[in-house]
Image (spheres, rainbow, N blue to C red):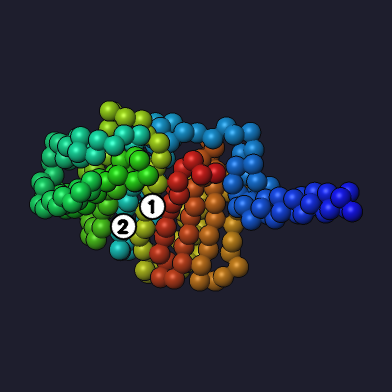
Amino acid sequence: MRRLVYVLLITLAASLTACATSVNDPNDPGGPNDPDPGGNRPTAAQVLAMSDDFDFSFMPGEDIADVEWDIEIDYDTTEFQAVFDYYDAALISAGFTQTDIETEGDEIEADYSNAATGVDVEIEVSIDDGNVEVDMDIDDFTGPFPAGFSLTEFGSLDVPIYGGANVVDVEWDFNFDHPSTSVQDVFDYYDGQLQDLGWTQVEIDDGDDDEMEAEYEREGVRLELEVEDNSEVELEFNKLRFY
């Protein structure tokens, strides 16, 4: 009887282990779909250092609308006031004027405007999971639109990197519309541009006429392209180190 109970307990433990393993995201490191099983993923700091190579251009001759550009940078520090002061000084030095500021607890939000370029920036500096997170947004930009943009540069804004702490994570998201162009034509342009820039398409979902998605890889970094209704384009580095 004891031997039977022992065998049953071992079987149950093995079953529970298998179940626990099965609920993990298959894309997680070590999972069956891990695109980089060797663990040679670039750090966030390395990706930022390569950002000058990530130069993209708008589809020429097309309407551009509803532009939203967003970058989040996490630093391994809790000195949120020092980080905010750094970005405040950098923006003012770049020709921006602070138009509003709110402080509550360990969070500071401020708005800036550059009259010469028409670029308005909203910045939020806060503590998130023990790190300082800087969230910088450009919304409702109406032009004139620059010929190109990159991971850290749009218009007159070249995002500075705080030197008093290490960068531990980056998340970049850029949205805009080409309302007078078809989803297929818009996707083909940006897909071709990305591949010309050295990005390798590793996955594509084109089963829906109103939406096309693809993933790309370059130097261990992943990028997502999505084009959907009204030819809304989204380019996204979604947490650069999560692959």
- Provide residue 241's location: percent of width, then percent of height: 49, 41
**Which of these two is toward me, 192 or 170?**
170
Q: Which residue is mark 2?
A: 68
- Provide residue 226's location: percent of width, then percent of height: 48, 59
**Which of these two is toward me, 64 or 162?**
162
Work out which residue is located at the far top of the displayed protein and give it.
164
Q: Amino acid at mark 1?
A: Asp
Q: Which residue is mark 1?
A: 173
Could one spot residue 196 in this view of the protein? no
Drawn side of residue 38 relative to residue 145, left or right: right
**Which image quarter: residue 76?**
top left
- Provide residue 105's location: percent of width, then percent of height: 20, 49
| Callouts 2 and 1 close, C-beta under 8 Å | yes
Number of marks in picture? 2
User: Which element carries disc 1, helix, strand or loop?
Assistant: strand
First reached walking from the N terminus: tag 2 or tag 1: 2
- Provide residue 228's location: percent of width, then percent of height: 46, 67
Work out which residue is located at the far front of the displayed protein and give it.
1
